[in-house]
Amino acid sequence: MALRKWVRLPSNWIRRNGLRALQWESNGRGSDNTAALMTLIAIAHHSNAEGGVTRLTYDALCFMTGLSRPKLSNGLDVLERIKVVERTPKGRSSYKLSSFNLNGGWAMLPAECMYSSGKITAFNDFYLRSATELNALKLFLLFVAQRGRDTNMANIGYDKIEEYTAIDRSKIKAAISRLTVIPLVYVEQVPSRKNELGFANAYRIVGLNPYKHMGTMGRGKDAYDYEEA
C-alpha cells in the first residue's frame, strides 16, 4: 500500500493526558515506552483510511522502525495496555487503532515525508537509551494533536506541555531540540501577548501544509491564538 501524505491518528487519548502514563524508567520500561510510540506511528501510517486497521508482520515493523523483535513486542504490549492499539482484529499480524472514528477525535499525522527507502528516517538515530527520545516522541504526538488548522501550528506553552505529558519542565527544551534536529518539528515565533515587543514559540509539524507558515501568513497578532512558555 502506497503511503499517503498524511493519515488520521486518534488523538482524544492524547488530549485526555494519556501520554502521562508513558514515563522513563531505568528498569527498561522507559525504552519500552519509546518503542511503543515508534510502533504506534508506523501502524498509523499503514492503517487503512476507513477503519484504522493494518496488516504488518513483525519483520516489516522492525524494518521501518529499526526496533528489535523483543523491543517491538514490548512496545505492542504497552500500546495494548494503554488501549491505543488492538491486536489481531482481523487475524494474525493485524492491528487496529483504538477509537478510530472518521467523524472526529483524530489529528493529521504526516506519513510519506517521514520515510526514506521504506524506513522512518527520524528513528535512524534512536537507540532507546535516553529519556530525551521518549520525551521528543511524546511532544511530537502532543503537537500533532494540538495543531490548529487555522494556524497550522501547535500553540502551547510549557505549563500545558507539563500537564499533558508529565515531562519535567527542565527537560522540555532538550526534547524540542531533538525534534528540530531529526527533523519532525519546526519552531516558529509568534507575537507575545505578555510583551508587545516580544515573541513566543509555536510548533509546526514537518510535512503538514508545508506552504502555510509564518513566511506566508505574516506575524500579525490577530492571526494567531497561542499560549506562552
Image (cartoon, rainbow, N blue to C red):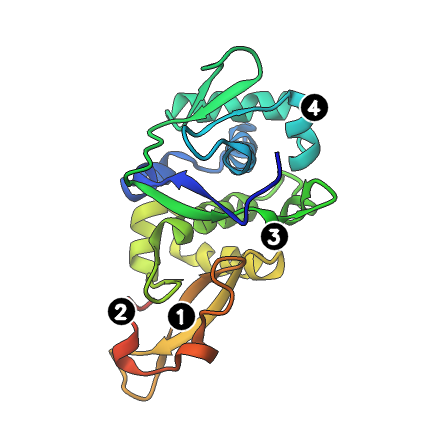
Question: Which residue is label 4 attached to?
Answer: 59
Question: Which residue is label 1 attached to?
Answer: 201
Residue 18 is left or right of residue 175, and the answer is left
- State if disc 1 and disc 4 touch (CB < 8 Å): no
- Disc 1 or 2, which lies upstream in sequence? 1
Residue type, label 1: Asn
Q: Which one is in front in this view, the residue at disc 4 or the one at disc 3?
A: 3
Residue 15 is left or right of residue 189, and the answer is left
- Disc 4 or 1, which lies upstream in sequence? 4
User: How far from the left and from the top, in percent, is residue 116?
Assistant: 71, 47
Residue furthest to the bottom in view is 197
Q: Residue at x 60, y 58 (%)?
A: 183
Real-space Cα separation, disc 4 to disc 1, in angstroms: 39 Å
Real-space Cα separation, disc 1 to disc 2, in angstroms: 12 Å
- State if disc 2 and disc 1 touch (CB < 8 Å): no
Residue 209 is left or right of residue 1, and the answer is left
Residue type, label 4: Asp
Relative height, residue 182 to residue 80 (above, below): below
Real-space Cα separation, disc 2 to disc 4, in angstroms: 44 Å
Q: Name the element at disc 4.
A: helix
User: How far from the left and from the top, in percent, is residue 129?
Assistant: 62, 40
Real-space Cα separation, disc 3 to disc 1, in angstroms: 24 Å
Q: Which one is in front in this view, the residue at disc 4 or the one at disc 1?
A: 4
Real-space Cα separation, disc 4 to disc 3, in angstroms: 22 Å
Q: Which mark is residue 113?
A: 3
